[in-house]
Amino acid sequence: MKTNKKNIITGIVILIAGMLLGWLFFGGNGNEANENDEHQHSASEQDQVWTCSMHPQIRQPDPGDCPICGMDLIPLSVEENSLDADMFKLSENAMKLANISTMTVGTGEASKELRLNGKVEVDERSSYTQATHIPGRIEQLNVNFTGEKVSRGQSLAIVYSPALVTAQEELLQAQDIRESQPELFAAAKQKLRNWKISDSQIERMLSRGEPIERFPITADVSGVVTELMAEQGDYLERGMPVYKIANLDKLWILFDLYETDLNWVKEGSKIEYTVQSIPGKTFEGKIDFIDPLLNNNTRVATARIEVSNKDAKLKPGMFVSGIVKNDLAGAKAKEMVIPKSAVLWTGERSVVYIKEDAETGAGFKLREITLGPALGDSYVVQDGLKEGEEIVVNGTFTVDAAAQLQGKTSMMNPKTEEPNADAMMMKMDIPQTYQAQFTPVLAEYFKLKDALVASDAEKAKAEAYKMLELLNKTKTAKLEGMIKSHLSKVKDMLQAISEINKIENQRDHFIILSENMVALASNMNFEGNPVYVQFCPMANNNKGANWISLSSDVRNPYYGDAMLTCGEIKDTLK
């Protein structure tokens, strides 16, 4: 019996000891774990950042409403929290699907390649118009097609000339009396020489004793016939053209030089060119003349080079393509050059997207840059980028579309600085007497603002008309020019609002009206309650717009119930 009691007591002691040991080993650790969990949870909550889905620039440590539009704030992820407010993230998989590629910006030698098109032409200095020196009818054309080669002195055509027959008869008659009248004989011979009849031909006439009826037209130069200007049977007066003959041993290549390219090509510029009919061969030349006159119709001048054509491979009319290279900055200077595919144009601005590495993808941010000359498929960057930065060069529009969907700064939604009320509050000396007259006008402005808050277009028209009537009754003769300018704009906007039926158009005019009212009110003394200058960043196509109010509570006149509390107080006028 004593043994059993002893065993029971021993078991109880062991059990208690085991429980004590278990509490020592596990109980303390459990509390520690709870403390760690609480610490981690607390730290996580402490690091949490809240933002607005419509205004991502808003970042607050606690949940609540957006101070601009009043929407509920949403939590940012840890990685989004680490990104700039204007930057957005794409995953590696999304970048691959969108075929987005980037490049690291660097500097190097910048040269502009100007591509010119032209044609092979006849050297005008070697082109000759063959004319007849003998009046008469063409009996025969010995050369009757273009492209035929002729040599100097070669007979080109046969002419029958009644006038020449008469002149020969006079010569023969003068020959009979040359002993008594040598002057007459000499004059008859000179008359024939004037028609470019040679002395040998004249002697032949005299030896025959009868006139020669048909005379040849001989070539004055050697070359190729480029144009037939008469036909068999035509009667030609002295000096009329029969052929055009050109020497093709030297030719011109005339390149079209557009007005925008004139600055890049100078006399002496070297040009590399290829001829379509001679594939695989590149020629070099030097521009020796640029036409000083621009064609009024085509806005094109010509740049000319002279080429030798002894081997007759070039033919007039052949098409030629040339490249003029220009070193923009000199041999030692370096320029920053980026591809054209990296640049987005907005009309007034040129922008690129900068890439920065993130933990699970890449962050992108819009950057405005200043471009220099275009270099074919690339641009010189004058300002906005630094060497070593990474930019998007393929898929730029895709990145911009993603930025717009995420509400970030993009090509069509640029980051605009909020209008500074202080900038509009230029110092003006408004007399107290006029301030007293203006007080009823300002009171009517607040009624107009309330009508726009209520989206009541008819009431807005009525209040604008009342305000305009009150303003017209004020005496402005002694006011300075700047004050009158603001008042004039206020009148124009009130006139427009009082005639417009659509609330959207009324609000557009209210933007300009309020800018001028803020400028005037900021130079006045207010007794009693202050006047608040309030601002909506989403009005005026996201450029932002101001208005003035007697209440510190934001009631947006540009959106009404749609975004009634969107805005903030920018200044307080007292």
Image (spheres, rainbow, N blue to C red):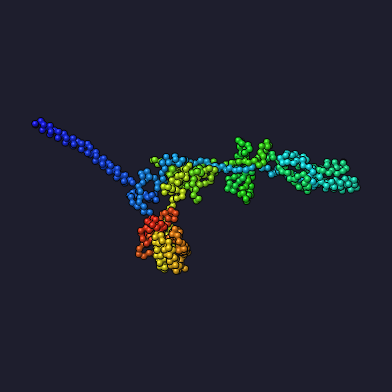
Tell me if I can see residue 466 in this picture: yes
**Where does the image place residue 153, in percent across and percent down from the top left?**
77, 40
Residue 316 position by quadrant? top right
Residue 490's place in the image compared with 287, above or below, is below
Number of callouts: 0
Q: Is residue 223 left or right of residue 427?
A: right
Q: Nearer the viewer, residue 381 or 252?
A: 252
95 is higher (above) or lower (below) than 570: above
Do we see residue 370 in this rendering? no
Q: Is residue 147 above or below residue 445?
A: above
Q: What's the residue at 59%, 45% (across, down)?
A: 265
> Image quarter for residue 507?
bottom left
Nearer to the camera, 416 or 459: 459
Question: Looking at the picture, how far across and down is residue 12, in whole percent?
Answer: 14, 35
Quadrant for the C terminus in the image: bottom left
User: In this orientation, which residue lies closer to the viewer: 2 or 346?
Assistant: 2
Q: Is residue 97 left or right of residue 206?
A: left
For residue 349, side relative to residue 551 (left or right): right
Residue 572, image x, y percentages: 37, 59
Q: Which residue occupies the foreground of this view, 61 or 482?
A: 61
Residue with the most extreme left position: 1
Residue furthest to the top: 3
Quarter of the picture holding the N terminus: top left
User: At 37% across and 58% down in the image, what residue appears?
Assistant: 554
Where does residue 41 sit, x and y in percent of width and height? 29, 44
- The residue at the point 38 percent across, 58 percent down is 555
Query: Image point 61% across, 45% down: which residue?
Result: 256
